[in-house]
Amino acid sequence: MSEPMVPYVKLPGLDEYKEWFKDYFDLYREDGILQVTMKTGEHPMNWSGGAHRAMSQLTRVLSLDHENEIIIWTHKGPDWMKDSDPNGWGRYAEERFQHQYFDDTNLIKNMIFDIEVPTIAAYQGFGFHWDSAILCDITICADNVKFDDPHLQYGLVPGDGMGLLMQTLLGTKQGAYRMYTSRQWTAQEALERGWVSEVVPYGTVLDRAWEIARMIKTVPYETRTITSYLAKRPLEWMYVKDLKLHTVNEQLSTMIKIAQGDLGEHGKGQMDEAYHGLYARWRYDNDVFDMLDPQTPESWNIHERAVEWTKDHPKGY
């Protein structure tokens, strides 16, 4: 075969780009199955402006590597994301438009439009920002998991895609109800509502995800890859219609609060992202507190109780 005038463009391989993202993700591939493990350094992922941007950057890069034939998406540690980096939002605030106009959309959209191979989520224990797990074609979750969307409790419009997923997968009335009340639902309820694919005992989620991945891997590459397009098609259509509308309206609510000088810590109309993790740990680690019940004004006002609880419950690392 004669040589072309110029060679194909050289793209980075796994050994190269896993170094690019090593602060935010561990990337491990075996027999074409890539495991993506979210993290912050050597700790479970602490949500930050850097993590926010890295997620959309990673999905773009993964989509360019055809050796990634199936992708498993999971989280470092025994649970899901439960905290944020209180010092990780300075650049986010400086680049708020780019983060909220571009990144908010892309970290969701790219999971569906860029990654064109089967995806499996291993949601091994509850936490916030479950959207990357629900966006996977198959979502395996632990039997102790609870789901919720706390945006409105923070004074923030739930427009980052989580509310849109709830409207689509839980239905119009339940989606609106959960956005307004932040009421949680269990793994079993999630299964019954079509929110997740399978519920397995806590501690077995990642093993089950690999088992399913290896099963799918036995199907011819072309067949399983084209099937992944059909699996993603309903979410593609949903995002074409409504994703930008949701993300821009969340951005608008923040811009209004900034203009009013009403964005910041507890006591402000909208809580700044730097403080979300403090309340998230209380929501998920406080054994007494339970938002599975219908909420009242007293139970819904979590702020002062969360502040006091976290004083006695620092991070476990």
Image (tube, helix red, strand yellow):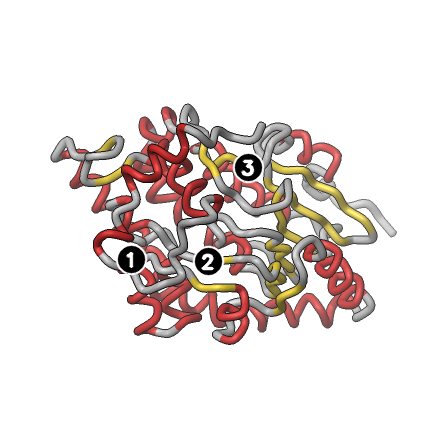
In the rendered image, residue 199, in percent from the top left (x then y), is placed at 62, 66
Image depth: mark 1 or mark 3 in front: 3
**Residue pictured at 32% horizontal, 39% vertical:** 305
In the rendered image, residue 275, in percent from the top left (x then y), is placed at 35, 33
Name the residue type under label 1.
Answer: Leu
In the rendered image, residue 209, in percent from the top left (x then y), is placed at 71, 59
Q: Is residue 230 left or right of residue 292?
A: right
**Pointer 2: residues within 10 angstroms few (<14), some, or many (20+)?**
many
Check if mark 1's residue and mark 3's residue have beta carbons within 8 Å: no
Residue closest to the eye, 11 or 143: 143
- Whole-angstrom CA distance, mark 3 to mark 2, is 18 Å
Comes first in the chain, label 1 or label 3: 3
Residue 244 in which image quadrant: bottom left
Relative height, residue 132 to residue 270 (above, below): below
Name the residue type under label 2.
Answer: Phe
- Whole-angstrom CA distance, mark 1 to mark 2, is 24 Å
Name the residue type under label 3.
Answer: Met
Q: Which residue is mark 3?
A: 45
**Pointer 1: residues within 10 angstroms few (<14), some, or many (20+)?**
some
Comes first in the chain, label 1 or label 2: 2
Relative height, residue 72 to residue 39 (above, below): below
Comes first in the chain, label 3 or label 2: 3
Q: Which residue is mark 1?
A: 245
Q: Which residue is mark 2?
A: 147
Which numbered circle lies on residue 186? none
Residue closest to the eye, 107 or 190: 190
